[in-house]
Every structure is written in C-alpha cells, then in structure tokens.
C-alpha cells in the first residue's frame, strides 16, 4: 500500500488500532504539557481548557481500546505508532502556544489536529488493501469528522480575541 | 535526504515519559526547547539506556534548564563550562552516556574556547546546542549567532559583526559528528540524537530552537528549514565546502567522522604505599 | 676548625654554566653521605643562559629554611650576579671563590668584607676533555665542606649517564681537579656529623604534594601549566596512571577546575594545582563546588603577586582570595602546609576533608615549599583517605541536599538507580530544585556552614609548640623559619610559643583561644605586603595583649634572624 513517508505502515487491523491508540495518547500527552505550561504561567482559564482537551482525548483512547476488543492496542501502539517525519496528527503545535493565549487559540490548534487525524484515516480508507482495515478506518474517519464538527461548534462559542490579546504591560524578566 | 531508519532495537522497552521528571518547565509557552526536551526523551527511549546511566550536563541559559526536566542525572553548572564538566565526568565514567546541553550564548560565546577544545579532544559525548540567536535568559542581547543587523538595546542598530559559524568551527576543530536539527521537528531531531549519541567521539548537534519571546521573527524558521540535499559525508574537505556554503537551514547529519574517541584508561586502584616513594629514598 | 651544625653554600654562574646542576649534585651527594639539607634556586628572567644561583644549606639535622648568611660563595662567573645581592648575604666570615676571568666581583661581595680566593675554574676546565667549570666548582666545595669524593663519583655516573661516557668521565676528572685546587685553601668550618636514624627522602614540596594527593585517594587531575605549580601536575601524570587514574591537560584554568568538578560529581576524588592567577580564574567554579556540595582539592602554589607578579618567587598573599574570594557566602576549606614534608600530609588531609565534607579544599602551598628540594625524614603514614558518604538508594524520593544532623547529606553517584538528581549552582531546595525562597536559601546556607563548623578536625588544625608569654603566630612556609628563630631566642633565655594554623578555614575559635592561653604578646609573621594573615587573625580571632606584625612581601623569605631580632627587641 502507499503510505505517507515517515508515518506508520498500516496493513492490518492491529496496525490500525495501534496507530489510532498512539494518536490519542500522544494527544493526551500534548494537551497535558500545554496545561502544565498554562499552570506555570498563570493562565487558569487555559489550564482548564487544555485539561478538558486532554481528558477528552483520554476518553477517545479508552474508546479505541474498547473497540479493539482482544487486540492489545498498547503493545501495538508501541510497535507501530512511530512518526519519524513530523509528529502524530493530534500532537498540536507547541510553537503556537502563548502564555496569554485564549480558548480560541487552543481550539484552532485542536481543529488543526483533528483535521490532520481525519486526513490520516482518510488516506488509509483510500489505500488499504485489507477490507477489515478499510471498514475500521472508515469508522475512525466518522469519529474524527465528529470531532472536527465539535471543535467548530465550540469555536462558535469562543470568538477570536482582539488584536491586543498578547499585550503584556510588564516587560520580560531576567531570571539568571 | 536519506530516510531516517528506525532500527529494530528501538522497540520502545522504555517510554519517553520514563525520562521526564515531574518538574514543570518554566520556559515560555511557544519556546522551541519544549520540543527539544521531547526529542531528548524520545531519543533516550529509543536508545533504551536506563535513565540513571545518562548524565545531562548544562551551563546557564534557558536551554541549560533542561537537565532537571529529565529524569537522568544532571548538572546545572556555571555559564559556559558545561563541556569541561562533562569531559571530566566522561573520562572518569566512560560507562555513562553523557549529553551536554547549551545555548548559543553559553556555548559559542563564553563557552567558545571549551567548544573548540572539546571538538579537538574528541571525548565520546554528545553536545546539543539550542540555538535561538539571542541571549534569552538575560533579556534579548545579541549572541554570536545573531544576525548583524538585529537591533537590541545593548547594540543599537545591530552588532555589525559576522555571525559565528558553529558547524564550520566544529569541523575545523575535529568534531566527529556534525548535525543540524530544527526543534519544530522533534521526531526527526530524536532520530538524529540517537545517531549522534551512538556515534563514537564528540558529536555536535546544533538545534535551531526559536525564542518566542525575543525572536518572534523566528516563527518563519519552520518555512525556511529544509532537509540537507545530500547525505552525510565522512570527508572533512567535502563537509567543509558544504557547511561553509549552506544557508544555515540545512537539516540533517552533515558529517560523520572516523576519528577514534579519546578515552584514556581509567581503572582506579588503591595504592601500594611503597611504590611511589622509592624514587625519593636516599 | 669548627664543626658547624649547618653550612650554607651558594653557587653562581650564567650562560649555561650549570650552577644549578652542581648545586643539585652537591645536595644529593651530601644527603647520600648522611646529611640533611635543602636547595633553592634563584634565576634571571631568561629561559636559557641566564644568570642562576643554587642556594644550598647542608645540616646535620633537618632544616626547613635557608640560613641568614652564606659561608661559601662560588662564582663560576659573575655576569649579572648583582641581582642576587639581596638573597646572598656574605660577610667577613664568608669565603668567596672567584674565577679571575669571570667578570668583576659584584658589589655585594666587594663591600662585604668576605675573603676572596681566586681559582681559574674556566681555564682548568678547558684543559680537561669534557671538563666543565661547574664541576671544578663542585670539587672545590666538596673539599672545603668535607665531603667525600666517592659519593660524587657514583652520582655523576647516574646523573650524566645520558650525556655519554666521555662527558661523565670529564666531569669526574674536573671534580678531582677542583678538589685538588681547594687543598691549599684554608676554610675553618666543616659540617658536624649527621644525626643518623630514620629513613630519609630527597624531595621537593611539589612532589610531596602530588604524593599526598594520591595517598588521599585522588585518581583524577586536570592540569593547566603555571609556574610554580606545573611540577605537581607533571609528577602526577605518570604516577596517576600507575594507580589507574588519569590526568587530563585542559585548555585553561576555567576548564581544569570544571573538569575536576565533573569528575568528582561522577564519584572520583579529583584535584588540580595552580598559582595565584589560575586561582583567580577558578574562583567562580569553586563557588559552584561549594553550592552544589562537590568535593575537590585545588592546590595554589603561591607566588609573588598581584597579577602576573613574580612567578618564580614566593609570597603569602593569596590568603585573601582563598578565604574571602568567593562571591556570596560560601564556606569552604582552606589549608596550608608548613614544610616540604608537610605538603604530603596537608594535601592528603585536604583530600580526605573535601570528600568527608563534600566541599572544595584550597591548599595554600608556595613557591618556596614547592620548588625547594630538601632531605627530610620519611613522613609518617597516615590513614586519611578521601571517602564521601554515598547514597545507597533506599529513601525515595532522593533529596540530594537533605538536612542532616551533621549537615552532610549522602551523595548519589551517577549510575545509582532511583536517585537521579541535578547538581545545582542555583540556590536550591533539599531536593535540589532551584528556588528563590527565603526559608530554603537560609536552610542551605546554614547546612553548608554547619557541616564545616561541626566537624571535628583534631589536633592537625595547627602546630602549637612551646610555652611563653610571647607567641609567634605564623603560617605556611615561614613556620620553619619561626621555629629556628624561637630556638635562637630560647638560647637567649626567652621562652616563645609557636602557633601556626594548618587549617585556615573554617576558623577554630575556641582552639585558637586555648592555644594563646597565657600569651601576652603576639608577634605575627607573614610574607605579604598588606598583612593579610594579620587581618585574617583580627577578623576571626581575639588576639590577647599586644600585637606586633613582622610582614613584608616577597620575593625573599623572612629569615630566622629577622624573627629572632623582632622577638629580642620586644622582650623588654
């Protein structure tokens, strides 16, 4: 099958579940890192946002485990879940974080992540040889589409911040 | 660029999280060093070296905060001297995996002399410099790699000086492995770190790691970096030509040397008292 | 003919004359024949061909300093020899041997009232195949002081073997010629027979420093050459390798101090040696070792300062920087050896203390001790060896800087599972995490102070000898001269106590007070321009009664007679 270079080779169901699980646990780790950053940098609103996102991804991970049934997703994730070019789809861009960021920013990051995940599974649907893989990948496509839509809905609640959002009246501080 | 191959023994017996401490970094959100930390832990996991067998040695600066964020042994030393600390450690503890972390100020300015001699000495260690072309910790002064026209309070209008070229200097001084990475590609960086650590002798990895606070212009780096167009060479002359003419954004392993690492025999014994005094006896 | 307890000989020459070689041979021969003695050198600024003087004191008992005056002065030639005037004191009682073709007698000889005998050493040497004037001179000295020729023969063989058979034969013949030429000279002194007894060594302070380091457990050294400390590092390089250790040459002192900190962090007792300018460079990292609680030993072989100063001469003016030079409050160890033999003990002890207390130890030796070659009684073996308390990995999470009753927290060596920590120069918590909190800062400052102040250092902290209402308080290389001065005063019926601290930091208030119990007059003796030791004493200790300070900077050591005079003047 044609795979995108630097991404996991998904030929079997075990591969697919492994990759899917890895995507979610990477996302949990990523949102947790961001939540910790926001905690240290005193942005409590964003702490909640990122912890919620981490929690949601954790639920997705558990859901995948359940869907996998007898397949040991943890072991397969370890085996197959390696992105050597770029990162796994839902590892949102740390470089886009800012200590004064707003929920809108987080949701933009999440949206990009979900879209990348959607593209990943869509590609598998289009190229997988194994019918079972194609079917399962299609289910993942549906779920990711649902996630994308959810983020869109949330974005309607959190408008884009004004241009002055990163303005900090205090200058940076030298620590050492 | 050659494909970075994940070798069979990277079966992740260890997880990257095994190499993270519970300390939450104080780096600004958006800092490239978060990615570097990720690359470190991923590389260590791939190498499957126990955390207690790794020592991360640093100097002073934002990048030098990294040791305490890992679960390895660490040393947060004084400004510019991490290579000396690491050299003394590795020569007497060849069993340890020694990784040195620095920044462009700590490593190329005050640490410049030690940099040259560490390359020359070729002790088996890996030197990672997180280059953000600015002194981040002390509020934004130009560093040796800062562009000559970068305006700062301490050098209004820019320094007007040619930036220091770390990779050329490393090659000229005898570094045995030279690579450039971009923090925004933590998995690629991790793979290169794995190779760097595995490669015998002094491995030098410069990681372009944007400073979100003092160099917001570095956001464009992710569009400027590109894989090096040719595979790594073991010919210093070839490497010299390539490195001297690259645009500063070539990513990948650029040079793999074949010098034997410097490791004198070290197996301390207790002393037989009479042995060393015979030469004084009248 | 009188028998003298000791005789002082100076051999002067220039331009490759080999004055220092004959001086060394003289000392070696005399000590091989059973005597004690010591040798120092004084030289011009040239790397080769300069004017040089070997200053030798031979004695029937161990001596630790040069005498005030020279009994015998041989001038192989007198070129630029005026520079030695202040160091080579000759008088009416002295005998000067001069080569008529060796240039004008220097003023300090002309005006001294010394007897001058001319012997044409250069001419004599020319008539001998591979004969050299310095060997003629050596023969003259040997005869005059009463040394047997045979001792020299074997020595010359050994020392000149690498220059070939002809050269060593030529030297032997020249020596004999010198002996013959001296037969006609009347010299009214000769050495009293030596006190026979213990095993003896012929050794320099720099060498004993190196041996002390290895005995103390040091197995790693980093080196950057500097006069007059380089010999320590050169001596250590092959000998460390012999015991499985390593010496690494560094690119500068900033590297060498950090290398030994890194090696010590990894578990190996480590040392470097330098002089004043190098110590200045190392100060920042010494602070790091203090804050991160890493044991290291730094030997400072003090030389004339400030700045580049007088690299080849001794002074005691690095006390300030060793004691007060660290930024912040950084209690640490400072020790000072008192003789060539004591360099062994003090360095060994320093290595032991540094490890026990997880702190840096500065050993203040000096050029006089470091580069003087002396015959000493074989130093006693002592059991001090560096051994730090290690963390064995049971208590979790490991707190590297945990409070302990005696202030010493177990140190985890890298490789120990479950005890990973980051050694930290930033102010830190017990765990080692950086903090700017008041309580934690205070706690760690107290810990580092208390661990030193609560430690039992034992009697080695100082040399305390004799009783009396006058005390001479001194330190380092002047201890020997003070002891001789006190002996001289004793013959005048003046009882004087000697107090010479070997441990300068941490201060030992109670014990110092006890040492001066009953003393009414304190004569402080030191080799510094500003009286650094005196001010140190005033800063940390109460001095009883009256105090006088005999101090002057280098380059010439304070002699016993100067101290004796100061004591005598004060007696009333």
Image: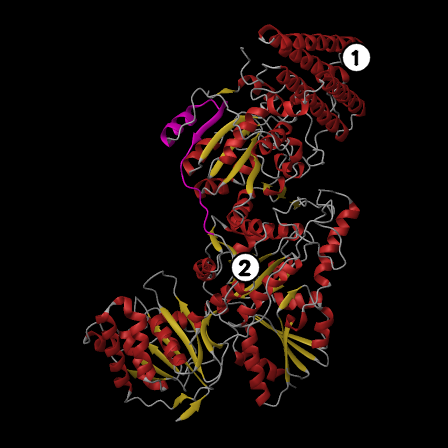
Asked whether C302 falls inside the magenta stretch, the response is no
- Give the residue drawn at x 55%, y 24%: B188
Few, some or many C-alpha atoms within 10 Å of disc 2 (few <14, some 14-19, many ≥20)?
Answer: many
Inspect this view and state whether residue B28 appears. yes
Question: Disc 1 versus disc 2: distance between alpha carbons?
Answer: 65 Å
For label 1, the residue is A158
Could you say which is closer to the camera, residue C143 or residue C223? C223
Q: Secondary structure at mark 1?
A: loop
Horizontal side, residue C252 vs residue B58: left or right? left
Horizontal side, residue C316 vs residue B178: left or right? right
Badge 1 and badge 2 in a common chain: no
Coloring applied to the structure:
secondary structure
Q: Chain of mark 1?
A: A
Could you say which is closer to the camera, residue C64 or residue C29? C29
In the rendered image, which quarter is residue B257 located in?
A: top left
Q: Secondary structure at mark 2?
A: loop
Quadrant of the frame with the C terminus of chain C: bottom right
Q: On screen, C123 above or below C358?
A: below
Position in image of residue C61 (x %, y %): 48, 83
Residue extending farthest to the top is A126
- Give the residue drawn at x 75%, y 31%: A40
Disc marking residue C218 = 2
Residue extending farthest to the bottom is C1
Q: On screen, A102 above or below B267?
A: above
Q: Chain of mark 2?
A: C
Asked whether B258 falls inside the magenta stretch, the response is yes
Q: On screen, C514 above or below C220?
A: below
Few, some or many C-alpha atoms within 10 Å of disc 1 (few <14, some 14-19, many ≥20)?
Answer: some
Give the extent of the magenta segment. Answer: B236-265
């Amino acid at each position: 099958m044609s795979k995108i270079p630097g991404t996991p080779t998904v030929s079997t169901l075990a591969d697919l579940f492994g990759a899917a699980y890895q995507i979610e646990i990477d996302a949990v780790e990523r949102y947790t890192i961001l939540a910790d950053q926001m905690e240290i940098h005193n942005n409590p609103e964003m702490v909640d946002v990122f912890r919620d996102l981490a929690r949601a991804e954790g639920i997705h991970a558990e859901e995948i485990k359940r869907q996998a049934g007898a397949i040991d997703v943890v072991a397969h994730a370890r085996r197959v879940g390696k992105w050597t070019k770029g990162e796994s789809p839902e590892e949102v861009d740390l470089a886009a974080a800012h200590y004064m960021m707003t929920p809108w920013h987080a949701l933009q990051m999440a949206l990009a992540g979900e879209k990348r995940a959607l593209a990943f599974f869509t590609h598998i649907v289009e190229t997988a040889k194994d019918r079972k893989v194609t079917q399962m990948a299609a289910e993942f496509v549906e779920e990711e589409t649902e996630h994308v839509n959810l983020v869109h809905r949330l974005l309607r609640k959190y408008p884009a911040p004004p241009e002055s959002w990163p303005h900090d009246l205090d200058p940076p501080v030298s620590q050492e | 660029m050659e494909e970075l191959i994940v070798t069979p023994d990277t079966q992740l017996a260890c997880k990257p999280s095994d190499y993270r401490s519970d300390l939450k970094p104080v780096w600004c959100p958006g800092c490239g060093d978060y990615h570097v930390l990720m690359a470190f832990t991923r590389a260590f996991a791939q190498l499957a070296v126990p955390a207690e067998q790794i020592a991360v040695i640093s100097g002073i600066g934002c990048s030098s905060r990294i040791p305490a964020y890992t679960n390895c042994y660490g040393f947060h030393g004084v400004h510019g001297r991490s290579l000396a600390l690491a050299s003394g450690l590795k020569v007497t503890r060849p069993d340890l995996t020694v990784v040195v972390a620095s920044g462009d100020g700590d490593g190329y300015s005050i640490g410049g002399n030690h940099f040259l001699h560490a390359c020359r000495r070729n002790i088996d260690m890996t030197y990672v410099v997180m280059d953000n072309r600015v002194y981040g910790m002390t509020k934004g002064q130009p560093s040796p790699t800062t562009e000559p026209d970068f305006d700062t309070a301490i050098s209004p209008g820019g320094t007007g000086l040619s930036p220091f070229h770390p990779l050329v200097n490393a090659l000229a001084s005898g570094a045995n492995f030279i690579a450039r990475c971009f923090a925004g590609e933590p998995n690629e960086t991790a793979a290169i770190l794995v190779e760097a650590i595995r490669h015998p002798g002094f491995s030098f990895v410069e990681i372009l790691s944007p400073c979100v606070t003092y160099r917001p212009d570095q956001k464009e780096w992710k569009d400027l970096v590109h894989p090096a167009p040719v595979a790594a060479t073991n010919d210093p002359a070839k490497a010299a030509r390539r490195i001297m003419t690259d645009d500063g954004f070539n990513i990948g392993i650029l040079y793999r040397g074949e010098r034997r690492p410097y490791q004198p025999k070290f197996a301390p014994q207790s002393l037989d008292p009479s042995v060393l005094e015979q030469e004084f006896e009248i | 003919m009188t028998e003298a307890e000791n005789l002082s000989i100076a051999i002067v020459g220039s331009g490759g004359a080999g004055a220092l070689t004959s001086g060394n041979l003289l000392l070696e021969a005399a000590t091989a024949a059973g005597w004690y003695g010591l040798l120092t050198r004084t030289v011009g600024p040239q790397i080769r061909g300069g004017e040089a003087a070997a200053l030798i004191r031979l004695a029937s008992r161990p001596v630790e300093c040069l005498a005030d005056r020279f009994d015998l002065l041989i001038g192989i030639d007198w070129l630029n020899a005026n520079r030695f005037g202040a160091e080579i004191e000759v008088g009416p009682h002295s005998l000067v041997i001069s080569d008529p073709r060796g240039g004008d007698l220097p003023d300090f000889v002309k005006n001294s009232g010394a007897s001058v005998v001319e012997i044409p050493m250069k001419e004599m040497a020319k008539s001998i195949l591979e004969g050299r004037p310095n060997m003629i001179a050596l023969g003259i000295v040997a005869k005059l002081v009463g040394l047997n020729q045979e001792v020299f023969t074997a020595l010359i063989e050994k020392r000149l073997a690498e220059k070939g058979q002809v050269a060593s034969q030529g030297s032997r013949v020249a020596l004999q010629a010198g002996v013959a030429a001296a037969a006609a000279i009347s010299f009214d002194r000769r050495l009293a027979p030596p006190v026979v007894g213990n095993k003896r060594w012929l050794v320099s302070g720099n060498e004993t420093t190196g041996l002390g380091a290895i005995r103390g457990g040091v197995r790693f050294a980093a080196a950057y050459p500097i006069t007059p400390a380089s010999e320590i590092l050169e001596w250590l390089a092959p000998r460390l390798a012999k015991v499985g250790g390593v010496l690494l040459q560094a690119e500068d002192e900033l590297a060498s101090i950090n290398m030994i900190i890194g090696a010590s962090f990894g578990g190996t007792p480590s040392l470097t040696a330098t002089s004043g300018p190098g110590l200045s460079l190392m100060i920042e990292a010494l602070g790091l070792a203090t804050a991160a609680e890493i044991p290291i030993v730094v030997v400072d072989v003090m030389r004339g300062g400030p700045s580049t100063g007088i690299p080849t001469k001794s002074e005691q003016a690095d006390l300030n920087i060793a004691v007060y030079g660290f930024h912040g409050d950084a209690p640490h160890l400072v020790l000072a050896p008192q003789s060539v033999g004591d360099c062994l003990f003090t360095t060994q002890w320093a290595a032991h203390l540094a490890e026990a207390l997880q702190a840096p130890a500065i050993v203040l030796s000096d050029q006089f001790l470091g580069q003087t070659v002396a015959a000493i009684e074989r130093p006693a073996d002592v059991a001090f060896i560096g051994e730090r308390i290690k963390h064995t990995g049971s208590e979790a999470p490991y707190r590297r800087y945990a409070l302990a009753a005696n202030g010493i927290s177990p140190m985890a060596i890298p490789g120990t599972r479950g005890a990973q920590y980051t050694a930290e120069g930033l102010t830190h918590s017990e765990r080692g995490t950086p903090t700017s909190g008041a309580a934690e800062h205070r706690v760690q400052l107290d810990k580092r102070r208390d661990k030193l102040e609560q430690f039992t250092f034992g009697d080695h902290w100082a040399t305390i000898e004799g009783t009396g209402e006058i005390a001479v308080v001194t330190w380092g290389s002047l201890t020997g001269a003070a002891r001789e001065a006190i002996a001289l005063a004793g013959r005048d019926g003046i009882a004087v106590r000697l107090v010479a601290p070997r441990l300068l930091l941490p201060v030992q208030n109670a014990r110092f007070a006890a040492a001066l119990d009953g003393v009414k007059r304190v004569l402080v003796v030191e080799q510094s321009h500003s009286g650094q030791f005196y001010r140190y004493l005033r800063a940390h200790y109460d001095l009883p009664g009256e105090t006088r300070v005999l101090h002057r900077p280098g380059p010439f050591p304070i002699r016993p007679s100067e101290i004796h005079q100061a004591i005598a003047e004060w007696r009333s």
